Image (tube, grey):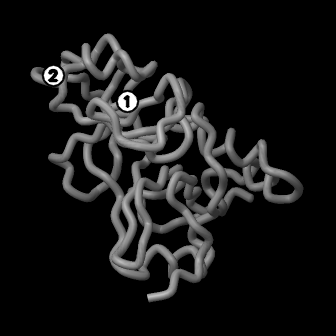
Amino acid sequence: MFLTSPQTKGRLLLATPPLEDPDFDRSVVYVLEHHEEGAIGLVLNRPSDEALEAPLDRWIDLQAVPSSVFTGGPVDTNAMIGMATTKVVAHEPVEHITPISGLIASTDLSADPAIVAAHVDSVRVFRGYAGWGAGQLDMEIDQGAWLVLDAEVGDVFSDRPEDLWRTILKRQPGRLSWLALAPDDLSLN
């Protein structure tokens, strides 16, 4: 299958308003994988009230602010996924860390945090993930449901995730930045 949409791994998907699925309305998704078999990503702007509990509470000292478990998406909500900012750009996996793009990597949450700490500055934990079947994300992008934008390390580890959708849009060039001003309820426009 040929991917018609732009390369998305390591980039952001911003839901265009209004996206009818409440799991993704105004969401910012960081794409972990995107190939002909499908795509996987994490919703970055859905912190929960859930705190890390044993055995994951060992990661609290490395946890980025806000220090809660984030709702990564509606798929496999028992899965816990760790994302990390690395101290240096890694091109190959090292010590329980798998690079994704630049300083952003995934980390094995079953590893000893003391070992991982030598390689990372911070960690964020996600429950569940967003997933798309073969060609599904490409079709949604082609239909205009998602904007594909470049990610910055600060996006994945934002300390103000509730503002992330608007913040990312505001920094875009030209008219695209105007979307940041769209009201949450478009009927009020």
Q: Where is residue 44 shown, x and y percent of the image?
A: 46, 42
Instruction: Tell which residue pokes out farthest to the right in this image.
Output: 174
Q: For residue 120, what is the image quadrant?
A: top left
Height in image: 114 above or below 133?
above
Badge 2 vs badge 1, beta-carbon distance below 8 Å: no
Label 2 Cα crowd, 10 Å radius (few <14 / some 14-19 / many 20+): few
Please tell me which residue lies in front, 157 or 73: 157
Q: Nearer the viewer, residue 189 or 181?
A: 181
Q: In the rendered view of the protein, which quadrant contains the C terminus?
A: bottom right
Residue 83 picture location, percent across and down:
38, 36
- The residue that mark 1 highlights is 124
Amino acid type of the residue tagged 1 in the rendering: Arg
Q: Residue at x 22, y 32 (%)?
A: 109
- Residue annotated with mark 2: 53
Q: Residue at x 29, y 56 (%)?
A: 74
Q: Residue at x 78, y 49 (%)?
A: 172
Of tags 2 and 1, which is closer to the observer? 1
Q: Element under label 1?
A: strand
Please state the horizontal and vertical placement of residue 80, each as a whole percent of the image: 22, 40
The vertical placement of 20 against 119, above or below, is: below
Comparing 85 with 115, the one in front is: 115
Task: Report the residue that reaches farthest toward the left.
Answer: 54
Residue 106, x across and y down, in percent: 36, 40
Residue most extreme to the bottom: 1
Pick whichever of labels 2 and 1 is earlier in the sequence: 2
**Quadrant of the rendering where the N terminus is positioned:** bottom left
Indicate the amino acid at tag 2: Glu
Instruction: Find numbered disc 2 in the image and state the secondary structure of the residue it sits on.
Output: loop
